[in-house]
Amino acid sequence: MSAPPVPTSAPPAPVSAPPAPVSAPPAPPVPESASPSAAVSSAQVSAPPAYRPVSATPAGPVSGPPAGHVAAPSAGQFSRPPAQSTGAEVGRPVSAPPVSAPPVSAPPVSGPPVSAPPVFAPPVSGPPVSGPPVSGPPVSGPPVSGPPVSGPPAPASAPAQPVSGPPAAAFTSAPPASAPPADAPAEPASAPAARPAEPGSAAARPVSGPPAGPLAAPPRPPDSTSDTEPPDSTSDTEPSDSASEAEPPAPPMDPEQALAAFRWRLDPETLREEATDPEELRVVRDGLTAKLGTALDNRSRARLLSLRSVASRILGDLDDALADGRLAVTYAEATAELRRTALARARLAQVLRWRGEHAEADRLFAEANSPELPDRLRAALHEHAGRSCVDQGRLIEACHHFERALDLRQGGDAELIARTGVALDAVRERAAAGGFGPWPRDRDVMRGGERAPAPTFDEELELWGYADVDGNLVIDHRYAEVQAFREGMAWVRRPEASRWALIDTSGAALIEANNGYRAVRSFSDGLAWVSMDGKANWMAVDPTNMVKIPPGFEDVRPFRGGLAAVRRGGWGAVDRTGQLVVPTRYHGFPTALADGRYVDGFTEEGLAVVELAGRRGVVDRTGRVVVEPAYRALVIHPVAFLVGDGGGRWGALDRRGELLIDPVHPSRAEVVAEIDQLLADTSPVL
C-alpha cells in the first residue's frame, strides 16, 4: 500500500472518482493477486487526464468479511492535501470496478477538484474487534466508507465502526448485549438454520456464536433495537469478483462451545478428565478471563466464572478453580434461575471432588439435580455424582447413578455409554478388591440432613408412632393421626384431642394442641398453613406459632420457592409476607410437568399453569402472564411449554409464549422428541 507506484508513460486514470475524458474505456480491474506495479502498468490510457485525480469518498461499507487488516499508511504520506496526493490511490491494487460514469466527450472540468459524494450502503453489523486485527493481503472489496480525508487519517487498526470480519482472538471479544448467555436455558431453534451466505455478502458477517452448552429455554430472536441486518440483506456496493471467490471466515467459537468441543481422555483409574492439548485449554481460559472484564450482570459472571473453574480444574489449578466455582454459585443463586444455579453447583462439586472434599461435593450434586431440568443435563449430573461415589468406595450408590443416567438418555448418547463402560470397569476392579461398600444414601442425607423418622402403625393399639431407618421405634405409638416429618417437624393428633400439635424429631412439642388448629398443612419454606375451624380462614404460622400471614383464604397450597397458591373467590398467589403476587382471578392452578408429575402451585423455576374459563396459560413468580390462558391443555417442559388443542394435536411454545412447534403432532411424546432434536446443549460442560 505505502510503496510508490512504478512510473508509467502516462499517469493512470483515477480509480475512486469519475475519470477524465479519454479516448479509451477505463482500465479493467486488477485481480486481487496482482502486485501494485502490475496494477499500474495494466491501466494504460491514450491521453493524460485533463485534471488531477480527485480523492472520492469510498463507495460504502464492505459488505463481506475483509480478507485481513490493511496496514495504515504513515502520516507522512498525507502531508499534502488529498487532491494533490495520488500515489496512494494509484498504487493500490484494485479488485472492484470504479464507481464512475462512462467516458464522455465533454471538455474537462477546469474548476477546483471536487470530492465525489459517498455512495452509502447499510452498515454491516458485527461484533466489535477487541483484539488487534490480523495483517493480511489488501482488502478485496471496496474500502470502508468514511468522510473525505483532510488530514492525517485515524489509525487503520481502530476503525470508526465495527468491522464485519472476525476478531483476531476468538475468545477475547465480549458478546453483544443482545446475545443470550450460554448458560441460559437450552435454545431450541424454531426454524432450520439459514442457508450459508454467498461469500462476500453482508450475510457472511460473523455472529456472536451459537448457544454454548446445554440450555433450558428456547431461542430469543434478535432484539428489535439491534442493528443487525437480516440475513438476506445486501449492500448497495457490488462485490468484486475476487471477493465472491473468497471463503467466508468461520465465526468465532464461544468459550463454552470450545470447551464442549474438547475431547477429554477419561483416566480409567481416577475417572478424571485429562486435556489432550493443555495449551489450547489455557487459551480458552484466557479468553474467559478477557470476557469477565466486560461482564457486568450476574448471569454472565456466573457463567464465565464457572466455565473458568472447569478449565482451571482440568489444568490442575484447583485453588483457582475453587475460588471461581464458589463465586459463580453466589452469582448464579442471585439470578434465581434453576438451570444456571444447577450448572454452577455441579461445576463447583467437580472441583470439590477432585480436592477430595466428597461430602460437600455430594451435597451440591444432590441440590443441583432437580427433576425439572432437561434429561441430558440430569444424566450428566448423575454420571458425575456416580464418579464421586466410586472415589469413596460407595459402589452400589455409584451403580445407581450410572443406571439412572443411562435411563434418562434411553440409549441415545453413545459417548455417555462409552464413559459409563469405563466407569463400570473401575467399579468391577474396586469391588473385587474391597467389596461394594455401604448402602446407598437418600437425597436428604446427601443434602446434609438426617433421615427423618417415618410413621409406623401399631395394629394392636391402633395408634401411630415414628421409627428410624433401622426400624427402631423412636416416638411411641400414641397418636390417632400423624403427618410425615417436613423440615424436621410433624403435625400429630392424640386420640383424646380434636386439635393438632406440632412436634420435632425427638417427640417434643413445639406447638401445643390447645392453640385450636383443627386443620393443618405440612411445613414448607419455614411456614405452615393452619385453620381454626378446619374449613376455611387459612393462615400461615412459623414453628414458634407466630402468625406470618393473617387468616382469610378459602383454600391454600404449600409454599414453593417463596410462593403459595391461595383461593379467595378465585385462585392467585401470595409470597411469604402475605403480599398478593398473582391476583385471585383464576379458576385453578393445574401445574403439570412433562414427566407426568403435578406440583402444587409453582415449579422450582417459578412458573405455574393457571386456568381461566377452561383455557390454560402460564404466570411467573412476579405475576407476569407468560402465556395467555388460550389453550385446552398446557404442560411445562424444562425448556418450553407443550400445548394441546383439545382434539389430540400437540405443539410447543417457547419460554416467551411464542409458537415453537406447530400443534400437528398426535402425542406429547413426539413434540418432546422434536424439542430434543432442536436443543443445542448436546454436551453439557461440567
Image: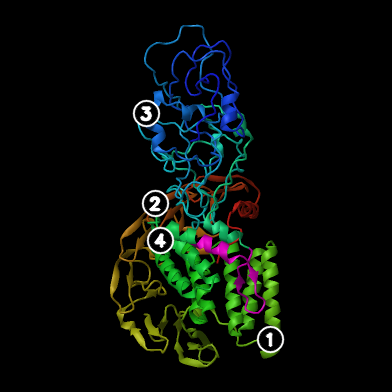
The residue pinned by badge 3 equals 80
For the residue labelled by badge 4, is the local secondary structure a helix, a strand or a loop? Answer: helix
Within 10 angstroms of label 3, few (less than 14), some, or many (20 or more) residues? few
Instruction: Answer with mark 3 or mark 2, whichever residue precedes in sequence.
Output: 3
Quarter where residue 564 is shown: bottom left
Q: How is the image coloured?
A: rainbow
| Front label number (3 vs 2) | 3
**Left or right of residue 5, residue 76 in this image:** left
**Residue 271, magenta (yes or no):** yes
Task: Name the N-terminal-most of marks 4 and 3.
Answer: 3
Range covered by the magenta-colored residues: 263-285
Instruction: Identify residue for label 4.
Output: 335
The amino acid type found where label 1 is placed reads Ala
Earlier-in-chain disc, 1 versus 3: 3
Q: Is residue 471 above or below residue 39?
A: below
Distance CA(mark 3)–CA(mark 2): 64 Å
Can you say whether 680 is above or below 146 in the image? below
Question: Hey, what amino acid is under mark 3?
Answer: Arg
User: Does 272 lie within the magenta span?
Assistant: yes
Q: Judging from the image, what secondary structure is the residue with disc 2 in?
A: loop
Horizontal placement of 642 versus 513: left or right?
Answer: right
Q: Determine which residue is flagged by label 1.
A: 431
Instruction: Report the disc number at residue 624.
Output: 2
| CA–CA distance in space, label 4 to label 2 | 17 Å
Q: In the image, is 410 to the left or to the right of 88?
A: right
Position of 231 compared to 538: left or right? right
Pick whichever of labels 1 and 4 is earlier in the sequence.
4
